[in-house]
Image (cartoon, rainbow, N blue to C red):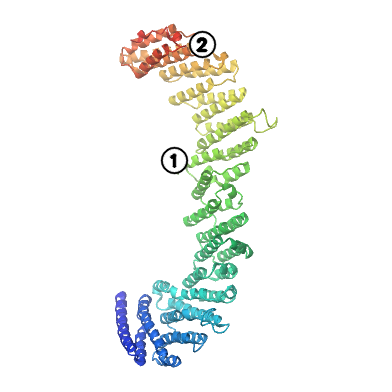
């Protein structure tokens, strides 16, 4: 309903403006000055309305403004035809109403200034004073806006044809400042006109009119002769006085932003303390972070665009002033949310990184200031504030792309302490990803210790964390990051690398039972890599007391892997014990190697009960033991005997068969003559064949016919016989294989031929035709398989 009325009133006013403008134009065309003034005054009377909203009033004002341009041209022509401009200036003051009178006065005043019959200063002073007569906020605001518009190109600045005496530009400056002050007062008063229930509506309307006030500051910035001294001593203090004293949130926020945007960067830099001194005096509800962020962004861009400007930043101590000002703002606004205060320090940090990127002490000081502010709040529970902290901590990472630089900032981990567990972990992920992305070299134990302390949200369990609440896939990805990080740690000095491994171990063992099975393996392999480096160097390069010796590292690994057996990861522990045993064997440490095998055997006996897991573990044991060359006869026989015993005790007969024939490899090593016991190889194979016979008998008893699976065991055994035959086992001849071959021939008649059997036959035929192998294979008769 109100909107409809607004439209009707606006339509009626526009119609009246058009009508009077028509008669005014007709009078102008006939050079009738009296009628032109009469109808122009009637047209301007439409601006006296109080019924229109600011938005609709603006539309009406634009209509009238366009018509006044025609009237101004007419006044110029009249003076050219001999009419006295002074008389015209007096004549328009006889208009009946104050508002039309002042609009006409501003219009003829613009022409009067151009005529140079009187100084521009006198006319401007007269106009700005007379406009005080209109104190209605809306009407007065638009009247002064019109005054600023028509006089904008007629201000007596230095170098213009209206310059006048030496102080004329100061008079122009005074005119603009006075007009700005009065406009701002009228604009602020609009907020207090009308019922309180419409406060939000009025604020929205005021926001639409803010550019009318801001244009004055733009004019000030364009005035010739306004140098740094005048800006510092006159312009800025006067503007800030008005900003602070108006005590209006909207006006203060907008005008501070205008100051920052319209005046030159070097002015801001040289008057930084004055501008920043006003910030704590603003209303608590003012969005001060927007104001200061705009200022710091402009200064940052200024520094980036001009290398010559950088010394000025140091000369004026820009960082210290900004840091002090932000501290004062936070102190003054006691109800400032944590997110807002962190945002302020975030902008200061970005400014510091941009302008003073080489001053780590400045960066650390910003972090310390933020810690001081956060100390009053404790752990952040506000998501917005936590996100700002993450952005705050990420800024140095993005700037330096080097975590080693970040580790030099003593206050960096102190800021992270205020994050909750999830956000702390997210920040830790960002840090680790930065290392991996930028291929950062973490080279000392102290750096590693600081890094792992920084990333503890990713490495350790926190109190109150329940494993069941963690998404398993996300958890795996997080710990994969930790594993990749461990592999990235490297130092050419073995002694320092040992310290790094020891430091990583300290943090990983505190990671909790869910993490250790994922984080201990990369630590173990990193240590094994160091052992290979030591083995490849000179013998005992560090002397007797050196800490980084293969034996000491292996002892450390033994204690580390043992932890896995306590956290329900025996399969993994067994694998790692065998890896360590391989490394100890390569270093010719027989006692240490035997100890690792002993621990692996204990795990197999006591912790691994699942039949499939036993099969896998036993294959690993046999494969690793077969490669051992460090053992004496007694130790090797002991370990071999245990392995063959485990093979015979597997739950399933087929598994027993395969494990037993794999044990045959324990008695034959190609490169060691003293490890070639052909007789025991044959014993293992025959024992495996007996187990296969038992499998075959069970199959016959249950199904009445042979099964493909049981025949496959015979073929696997045949392949083992062929392998050792080729390796030169003197106990194996073609006659030895004959019984097995005949058995396979008889059994294959009962089942369909398998590809495995066929490929074995083709291999035998191929080997019979090869030089050096034909003699070994000649006693194997192919017709057995026909």
Q: Can you say whether 486 is above or below 236 in the image?
A: above
Q: Quadrant of the C terminus?
A: top left
Observer-nearest residue: 485 or 123?
123
The residue carrying pointer 2 sits among few (fewer than 14), some (14 to 19) or many (20 or more) residues within 10 Å by Cα, namely some
Q: Which residue is disc 2 drawn over?
A: 678
Q: Can you say whether 416 is above or below 286 in the image?
A: above
Residue 305 x/y as whole percent: 54, 61
Q: Which secondary structure, mark 2?
A: helix
Mark number for residue 472?
A: 1
Residue 330 x/y as whole percent: 55, 64
Q: Residue at x 51, y 11 (%)?
A: 678
Left or right of 541? Residue 367 is: left
Q: Are marks 1 and 2 in contact (CB under 8 Å)?
A: no
Does residue 608 appear in the picture of this structure? Answer: yes
Q: Residue at x 50, y 11 (%)?
A: 729
Q: Can you say whether 142 is above or below 608 in the image?
A: below
């Amino acid at each position: 309903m109100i909107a409809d009325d607004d439209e009707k009133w606006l339509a009626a006013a526009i119609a009246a403006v058009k009508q009077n403008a028509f008669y005014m134009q007709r009078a102008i065309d006939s050079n009738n000055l009296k009628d032109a003034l009469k109808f122009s005054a009637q047209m301007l009377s439409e601006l006296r309305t109080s019924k229109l909203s600011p938005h609709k009033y603006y539309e009406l004002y634009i209509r009238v403004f366009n018509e006044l341009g025609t009237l101004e041209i007419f006044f110029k022509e009249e003076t050219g035809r001999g009419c006295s401009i002074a008389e015209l200036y007096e004549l328009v003051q006889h208009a009946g109403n104050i508002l039309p009178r002042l609009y006409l006065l501003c219009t003829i005043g613009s022409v009067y200034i151009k005529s140079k019959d009187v100084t521009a200063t006198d006319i401007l002073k007269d106009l700005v004073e007379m406009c005080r007569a209109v104190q209605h906020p809306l009407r007065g605001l638009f009247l002064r806006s019109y005054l600023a518009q028509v006089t904008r190109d007629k201000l007596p600045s230095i170098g213009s044809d209206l310059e006048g005496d030496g102080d004329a530009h100061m008079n122009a400056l005074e005119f603009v400042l006075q007009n700005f002050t009065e406009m701002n007062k009228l604009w602020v008063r609009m907020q207090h006109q009308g019922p309180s229930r419409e406060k939000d509506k009025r604020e929205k309307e005021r926001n639409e009119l803010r550019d009318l006030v801001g244009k004055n500051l733009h004019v000030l910035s364009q005035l010739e002769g306004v140098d740094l001294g005048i800006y510092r001593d006159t312009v800025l203090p006067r503007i800030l006085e008005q900003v602070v004293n108006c005590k209006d949130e909207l006006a203060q926020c907008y005008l501070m932003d205008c100051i920052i945007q319209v005046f030159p960067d070097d002015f801001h830099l040289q008057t930084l303390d004055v501008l920043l001194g006003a910030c704590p005096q603003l209303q608590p509800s003012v969005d001060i972070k927007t104001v200061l962020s705009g200022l710091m962004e402009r200064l940052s861009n200024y520094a980036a665009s001009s290398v010559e400007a950088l010394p000025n930043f140091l000369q004026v101590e820009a960082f210290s002033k900004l840091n002090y000002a932000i501290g004062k703002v936070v102190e003054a606004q006691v109800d400032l949310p944590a997110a807002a205060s962190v945002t302020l320090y975030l902008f200061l940090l970005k400014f510091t990184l941009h302008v003073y990127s080489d001053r780590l002490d400045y960066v650390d000081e910003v972090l310390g200031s933020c810690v001081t502010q956060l100390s009053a709040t404790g752990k952040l529970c506000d998501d917005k504030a936590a996100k700002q902290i993450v952005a705050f901590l990420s800024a140095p990472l993005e700037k330096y792309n080097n975590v080693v630089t970040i580790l030099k900032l003593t206050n960096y981990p102190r800021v992270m302490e205020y994050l909750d567990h999830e956000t702390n972990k997210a920040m830790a992920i960002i840090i680790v990803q930065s290392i991996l992305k930028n291929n950062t070299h973490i080279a000392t134990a102290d750096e590693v210790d600081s890094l792992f302390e920084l990333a503890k949200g990713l490495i350790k369990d926190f109190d109150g964390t329940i494993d069941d609440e963690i998404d398993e896939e996300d958890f795996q990805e997080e710990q994969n990051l930790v594993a990749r990080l461990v592999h990235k740690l490297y130092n050419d000095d073995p002694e320092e690398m040992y310290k790094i491994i020891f430091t990583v171990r300290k943090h990983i063992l505190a990671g909790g039972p869910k993490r250790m099975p994922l984080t201990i393996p990369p630590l173990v392999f990193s240590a094994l890599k160091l052992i290979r480096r030591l083995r490849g160097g000179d013998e005992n390069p560090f002397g007797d007391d050196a800490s980084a010796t293969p034996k000491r590292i292996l002892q450390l690994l033994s204690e580390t892997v043992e932890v896995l057996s306590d956290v329900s990861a025996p399969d993994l522990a067994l694998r790692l014990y065998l890896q360590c045993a391989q490394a100890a064997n390569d270093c010719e440490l027989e006692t240490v190697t035997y100890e690792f095998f002993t621990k692996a055997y204990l795990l197999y006996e006591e912790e691994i009960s699942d039949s499939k897991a036993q099969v896998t573990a036993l294959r690993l044991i046999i494969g690793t033991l077969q490669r051992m060359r460090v053992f004496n006869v007694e130790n090797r026989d002991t370990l071999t005997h245990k392995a063959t015993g485990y093979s015979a005790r597997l739950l399933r007969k087929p598994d027993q068969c395969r494990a037993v024939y794999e044990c045959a490899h324990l008695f034959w090593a190609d490169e060691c003559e003293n490890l070639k016991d052909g007789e025991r190889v044959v014993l293992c194979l025959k024992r495996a064949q007996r187990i296969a016979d038992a499998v075959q008998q069970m199959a016959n008893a249950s199904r009445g016919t042979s099964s493909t699976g049981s025949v496959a065991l015979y073929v696997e055994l045949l392949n083992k016989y062929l392998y050792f035959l080729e390796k030169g086992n003197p106990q194996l001849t073609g006659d030895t294989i004959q019984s097995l071959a005949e058995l396979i021939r008889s059994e294959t008649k009962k089942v369909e031929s398998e590809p495995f059997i066929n490929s074995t036959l083709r291999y035998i035929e191929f080997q019979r035709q090869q030089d050096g192998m034909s003699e070994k294979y000649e006693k194997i008769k192919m017709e057995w398989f026909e």
